[in-house]
Amino acid sequence: MSDIPYSISQVVELAGISRRTLRYYVAQGVLMPPVGHGRKAHYTVEHIERVRKVRELQEGGLTLSQIRNAFEQAERLEQDPDHSVMTDHPIEKAASVFGAGSSHGWNHLPASGELLVLVRADLPVERAEIIKQAVATMMASLEGENTNDD
């Protein structure tokens, strides 16, 4: 973790956003509040990296709510990394390949008009195939449910 303090002016310049957007991200729970209070409040390099990740995910089509949920899930997995491995469900097995809290790049895997899956860019081909198969199984299951509802 970096100990270098950044002012709000420095963060918005480095991250390419407005002060209003920065405050909105904090209010929406996708960015942690600054360290400290009042005039001593400051940001860290982790704040800047998180803002950049949020922007990247938004450009990929995710809403702030979806991004917040993804960050919360990653934090839960970081606290209990073996959770998703303790199941035979193919989707949860596929989820176990993600390194929660990883700083690696991500690739988009469009599954349908309503689903976008993010996979680590450095993911081995075999694991990527497991994810693709699990997503295909899930989508087929969802399509079957929609057919039965008609």
Image (tube, rainbow, N blue to C red):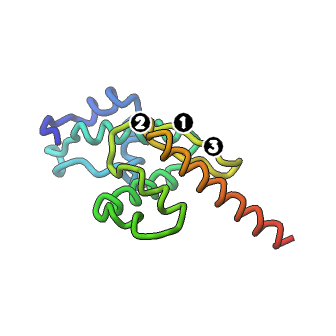
Looking at the image, tell me whether mark 1 or mark 2 is earlier in sequence order: 1
Place of residue 44 in the rendered image (x, y in percent of width and height, measured from the top left): 21, 39
Quadrant housing residue 121: top left
- Comes first in the chain, label 2 or label 3: 3
Identified at 42% across, 48% down, the residue is 24
The quarter of the image holding the C terminus is: bottom right
Helix, strand or loop status at disc 3: strand
Identity, as a three-letter code, of the amino acid under mark 2 = Asp
C-alpha distance separating marks 1 and 3: 14 Å
Residue at the outermost front position: 126
Please rate how many residues cluster around mark 1, counting C-alpha atoms within 10 Å: few if below 14, some from 14 to 19, many from 20: few
Give the labeled residue for mark 2: 122
| Residue type at the position of mark 3 | Pro
Q: Which residue is mark 3?
A: 110
Q: Name the residue rendered at 54%, 36% in the picture.
A: 59
Q: Amino acid at mark 1?
A: Glu
Q: Nearer the viewer, mark 2 or mark 3?
A: 2
